[in-house]
Image (tube, helix red, strand yellow):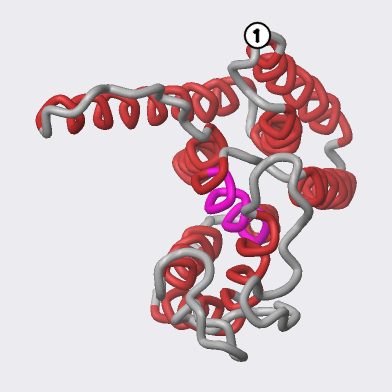
Amino acid sequence: MTAVVVGALLAGLLVAPALRGLVVRYAVPEGQEWCTACPSCARELRGLPPNGRCPGCRERLGPRPGLVEAVTAAAVAAALSAAHPGDAALLLWAAGPGVVLGFTDARVRRLPYPLTWALAAGLALLLVVLELAAGSPGVLLRCLLVALAAAALFELPGWFGLMGAGDTVLALGLGALLGRYGWSVAFTGLFAAAALSGLWAVARAVAALVRRRPVRGLDLPMGPFLLLGTLAAVLLQ
């Protein structure tokens, strides 16, 4: 347990600055170019310190100080706590793009293709290597079927403008991961994502009513809930 905690803290300190920079890069509204430089001083953004301030002009950018670092450390700790090394490798790969996707979707309701496809492609490659090495090629077929089913499940609402294309690609990649553990685990992960998003919507509505404010459109980001649901299903299976 000590090794897991130390590893998670080191990851939070070493990897999170790059992830924070990626959040600032991709967390821009649909139709705008990626933010590759500080809006105030035009300094190129390769990474940001935990305080979230530009090294050039000291303007604060991105999420609150320490938040990306804390989420990164928690994600790494969860991945390292997996019972099987293969599970840990899959979750660690998903953690990097997943942290950036979660923050980006929460801020601008957008799941950028460079990140969703990177997550899906990396998971697919790892799954092929792990299952062929274990002599279980049949599992790969189930991974493919679950991935396609999850993508279709998220694509249909997109036809009515209820979800974006990024949700479909994210569901494709995470569906493949869930498929490794069986249909019941896949169902659990997707159900958990829907349940968490529903609970969050209810909580927002109740909070608005308590403060006597109008309940505005509940355009919830599905990315963070899909990531959390998948993580919970894999760790609890």
Indicate the position of residue 68 as horizontal and vertical percent values.
Answer: 48, 67
Indicate the position of residue 32 as horizontal and vertical percent values.
Answer: 74, 48
Q: For mark 1, what is the residue?
A: 160
- Magenta stretch secondary structure, dominant: helix
Whether 103 is among the magenta residues is: yes
Residue 130 seen by the camera: no
Indicate the position of residue 19 as horizontal and vertical percent values.
Answer: 63, 68
Residue at (33, 31) in percent of width and height: 200
Indicate the position of residue 87 as horizontal and vertical percent values.
Answer: 64, 52
The kind of residue tagged 1 is Phe
> On screen, 7 above or below 23?
below
**Quarter occupied by residue 186:** top right
Residue 159 seen by the camera: yes
Query: In terms of depth relative to the viewer, which is nearer, 210 or 14?
Result: 210
Residue at (87, 43) in percent of width and height: 135
Residue at (48, 75) in percent of width and height: 60
Whether 72 is among the magenta residues is: no
Query: In terms of depth relative to the viewer, which is nearer, 93 or 138?
Result: 93
Query: In terms of depth relative to the viewer, which is nearer, 48 or 92?
Result: 48
Q: Name the image quarter holding the N terminus.
A: bottom left
Q: Which stretch did the figure color magenta?
A: 95-105
**Quarter occupied by residue 138:** top right
